[in-house]
């Protein structure tokens, strides 16, 4: 399942790394693509969307 999430607080490559690390610590098999220009994060995962959003919020990058 691919999730497309708008994450307004992503601003730079360090943010992308933080988001990617947070998701991968929760789901090591996830594929994460984040774009600081569009503020879009695409996550290929088998985990429920609400769990991924909670992981992002806990990392300081809540999805809109």
Image (cartoon, grey):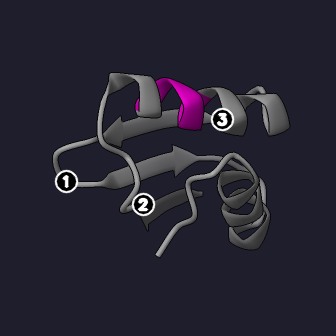
Return the disc, 2 or 1, that comes first in the chain's sequence. Answer: 2
Which residue appears at 63% of the width and 51% of the height? Answer: 60
Asked whether residue 6 is drawn in magenta, I would say no
Q: Establish if 33 lies above or below 45.
A: above
The residue wearing badge 3 is: 30
Which residue appears at 79% of the width and 37% of the height? Answer: 27
Q: Alpha-carbon neighbours of circle 3 within 10 Å: few (<14), some, or many (≥20)?
A: some
In front of the other: 25 or 62: 62
State the separation of the CA atoms marked 3 and 1.
Answer: 21 Å
Question: Element type at marker 1?
Answer: loop
Rendered-image quadrant of the N terminus? bottom right
Across and down, in percent, residue 42 comes to 43, 49
Q: Alpha-carbon neighbours of circle 2 within 10 Å: few (<14), some, or many (≥20)?
A: many
Question: Element type at marker 2?
Answer: loop
Eye-nearest disc, 3 or 1: 1
Which residue appears at 67% of the width and 64% of the height? Answer: 53
The residue wearing badge 1 is: 38
Q: Which mark is on residue 7?
A: 2
Position of 26 with respect to 8 (left or right) is right
């Amino acid at each position: 399942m691919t999730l497309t999430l708008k994450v307004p607080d992503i601003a730079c490559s360090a943010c992308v790394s933080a988001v990617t690390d947070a998701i991968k610590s929760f789901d090591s098999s996830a594929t994460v693509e984040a774009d600081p220009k569009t503020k879009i994060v695409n996550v290929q995962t088998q985990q429920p969307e609400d769990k991924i959003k909670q992981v992002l919020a806990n990392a300081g990058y809540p999805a809109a």
